[in-house]
Image (cartoon, rainbow, N blue to C red):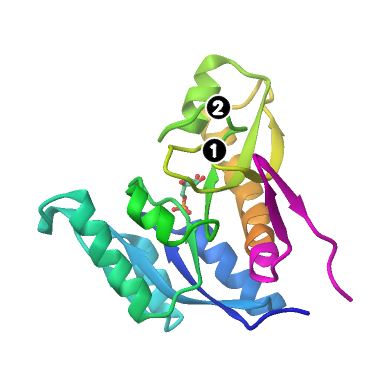
Amino acid sequence: MISRRKKIAVFASGFGSNFQAINDYIKNKGINGYIGLLFSNNPGAYALQRAEKDNIATYALDPKDFNDRKEYDQEIAKVLKKENIDIIVLAGYMLLFTPGLVNLFKNRIINIHPSLLPAFKGTQGIKDAYDYGVKVTGVTVHFVDAELDHGPIILQKEVAVNDSYSLKDLEERIHQVEHDLYPKAVEYLCSDRLQIKGRKVIIREKEV
Ligand code: GRF
């Protein structure tokens, strides 16, 4: 039995192309969830404009206006509670959640990272892989725990690095794959198809 529709908060710090891909997928295909909120730590994020265009509620809080990250995340927790958020989708959110916020949404926060984790963690996953000279890199969607780019892996997809690729070519290819992969992971999570067993995530068959 599929549960009630999940209310999703997407967190983005910048361009928001992954937010857009998820939003388009939900609008075109329909899943057991909807984006009820776009949150940003950056009041100038283009992602906020994308959400506004679709009449999705937006919320921007600048960490500089808070004493520390704990206080900042406590304020975020209040917003999420007030909005009755079920699931958090990090899509280019450039801050690490404090453990308190991670625990509050345990196994209900997912992130996308532009490399095949555990390789090339951090903010420059595409460039780091390219500079390293790897022949294959890719995209990872994973649950979020308190460690950077670390939680159990939901989906991964490889991307071959052709010898002719510039860094920009690789970035474009990675983003295409992200936009294909991330909405599917959101769909699985919303329909309770993901089961975490230690570090492994089992994707259950769709109910018919
Ligand atoms: C993506 O490459 C994602 O993997 C990383 O940040 C980037 C966000 O891009 N975490 P966008 O803002 O969704 O366009």
Give residue 47's mark.
none
**Residue on which the image places disc 1:** 171
Q: Nearer the viewer, residue 76 or 198?
A: 198
Q: What amino acid type should be assigned to the residue bearing mark 1?
A: Glu
Q: Residue at x 32, y 49 (%)?
A: 98
Q: What amino acid type should be assigned to the residue bearing mark 2?
A: Ser
Give yes or no for residue 182 being in the magenta stretch. Answer: no
Query: Magenta part of the protein: which range?
Result: 187-208
Q: Nearer the viewer, residue 127 or 76?
A: 76
Give residue 166's mark.
2
Q: Residue 41 placed where, x, y %? A: 27, 58
Between disc 1 and disc 2, the foreground one is: 1
The answer to whether marks 1 and 2 mark residues whose Cβ atoms lie closer than 8 Å is no
Q: Residue 128 placed where, x, y %? A: 48, 24
Q: Residue at x 10, y 53 (%)?
A: 67
Q: Quadrant of the N terminus?
A: bottom right
